[in-house]
Image (tube, grey):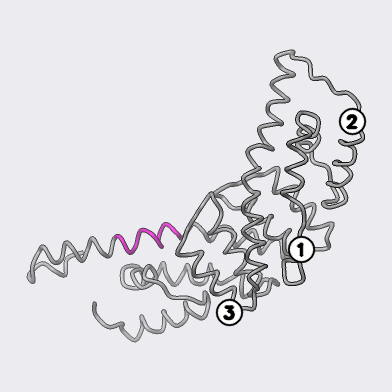
């Protein structure tokens, strides 16, 4: 592969300053479409340059998004996990990120129990709603004490299957330790997981934005998180460009010296 031209070297250095990394796919884009790489560098770096989130918080958000079961982008996870450690993240904080990504699996349950309630009503199937037992009231009070709200899906699960709600609440329990994520950071991570287009959950996103505002999180921080979730779209390039480069090299090798430069 030919050495970089002076113009390409300048572009590479600018990208690394804006995004903090250089990968095979960026190398490929530099050679195949430098104009797009330059535009993405400005776009991807904008929120970091103009938003209030710390470098560590930004990397932890990327860890959550890349590690989510809706994405599972291992190379990005490895990159941003190491960058998070470099920015001072503790192992416990990263485990907390994984824990929050794990409970993202509840989103389908929480949407589904609401749809089930609506369809039962439409079908005329009675939905007995006796008064809550003391045990159910205690579960509700525990949830409200931890999260400060009571979404509809909580009421529906508590009444439909209090045993399930009890183990769900235990799964969600805040087990903060001295070097784990604080409540604000956990909220921002959950907000990102609900906002990302790979698992967009409008209802859950609204719940998390309300929680963020109650916790005193600035609207600029929320906007920055929303901007960051869109960055996962570039993983089409992260996966696709190296494959394209390999295919072009294979074609060049098969074509022989006379046709090797064709693109």
Q: What distance separates the C-alpha of mark 3 from that of mark 2?
A: 49 Å
Q: What distance separates the C-alpha of mark 2 from that of mark 1?
A: 30 Å
- Residue under label 2, please give it: 132
Residue 163, image quadrant: top right
Q: Is residue 84 above or below residue 70?
A: below
Q: Is residue 239 above or below residue 206?
A: below
Element at badge 3? helix
Looking at the rendering, in which quadrant would you find the C terminus? bottom left
Q: Main secondary structure of the magenta part?
A: helix
> What's the residue at 72%, 24% (across, down)?
118
Q: Is residue 48 above or below residue 153?
A: below
Nearer to the camera, 14 or 81: 81
Q: How many marks?
A: 3
Residue 89, image quadrant: bottom right
Looking at the rendering, in which quadrant would you find the N terminus? bottom left
Q: Nearer the viewer, mark 3 or mark 1?
A: 1
- Residue under label 3, please give it: 86
Q: Nearer the viewer, mark 3 or mark 2?
A: 2
- Residue under label 1, please give it: 176
Nearer to the camera, 133 or 21: 133
Element at badge 2? loop
Give percent across and percent down for residue 176. 76, 63
Nearer to the camera, 84 or 211: 84
Residue furthest out toward the top:
124
* Left or right for 187, reference 259: right
Q: Is residue 241 magenta?
A: yes
The stretch in magenta equals 235-243
> What's the residue at 53%, 61% (across, down)?
231
Crowding at label 3, few (<14), some or many (≥20) Cα neighbours within 10 Å?
Answer: few
Going from the N terminus, do you reach mark 3 or mark 2 first? 3
> What's the residue at 63%, 63% (across, down)?
95
* Left or right for 128, reference 107: right
């Amino acid at each position: 592969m030919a050495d970089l031209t002076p113009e390409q070297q300048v572009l590479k250095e600018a990208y690394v300053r804006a995004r903090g990394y250089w990968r095979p796919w960026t190398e490929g884009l530099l050679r195949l479409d430098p104009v797009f790489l330059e535009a993405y560098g400005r776009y991807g770096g904008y929120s970091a340059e103009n938003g209030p989130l710390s470098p560590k918080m930004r990397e932890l958000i990327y860890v959550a998004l890349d590690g989510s079961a809706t994405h599972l982008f291992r190379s990005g996870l490895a990159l941003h996990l190491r960058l998070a450690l470099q920015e001072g993240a503790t192992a416990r904080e990263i485990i907390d990120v994984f824990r929050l990504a794990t409970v993202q699996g509840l989103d389908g349950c929480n949407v589904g129990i609401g749809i089930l309630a609506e369809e039962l009503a439409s079908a005329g199937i009675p939905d007995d709603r006796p008064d809550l037992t003391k045990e159910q009231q205690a579960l509700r009070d525990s949830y409200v004490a931890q999260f400060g709200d009571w979404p509809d899906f909580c009421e529906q699960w508590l009444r439909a299957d209090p045993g399930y709600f009890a183990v769900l609440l235990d799964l969600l329990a805040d087990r903060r330790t001295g070097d784990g994520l604080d409540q604000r950071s956990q909220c921002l991570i959950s907000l990102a997981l609900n906002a990302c287009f790979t698992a967009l959950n409008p209802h859950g996103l609204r719940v998390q934005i309300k929680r963020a505002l109650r916790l005193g999180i600035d609207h600029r921080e929320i906007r920055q998180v929303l901007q960051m979730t869109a960055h996962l779209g570039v993983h089409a390039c992260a996966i696709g460009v190296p494959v394209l480069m390999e295919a072009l090299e294979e074609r060049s090798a098969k074509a022989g010296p006379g046709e090797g430069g064709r693109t």
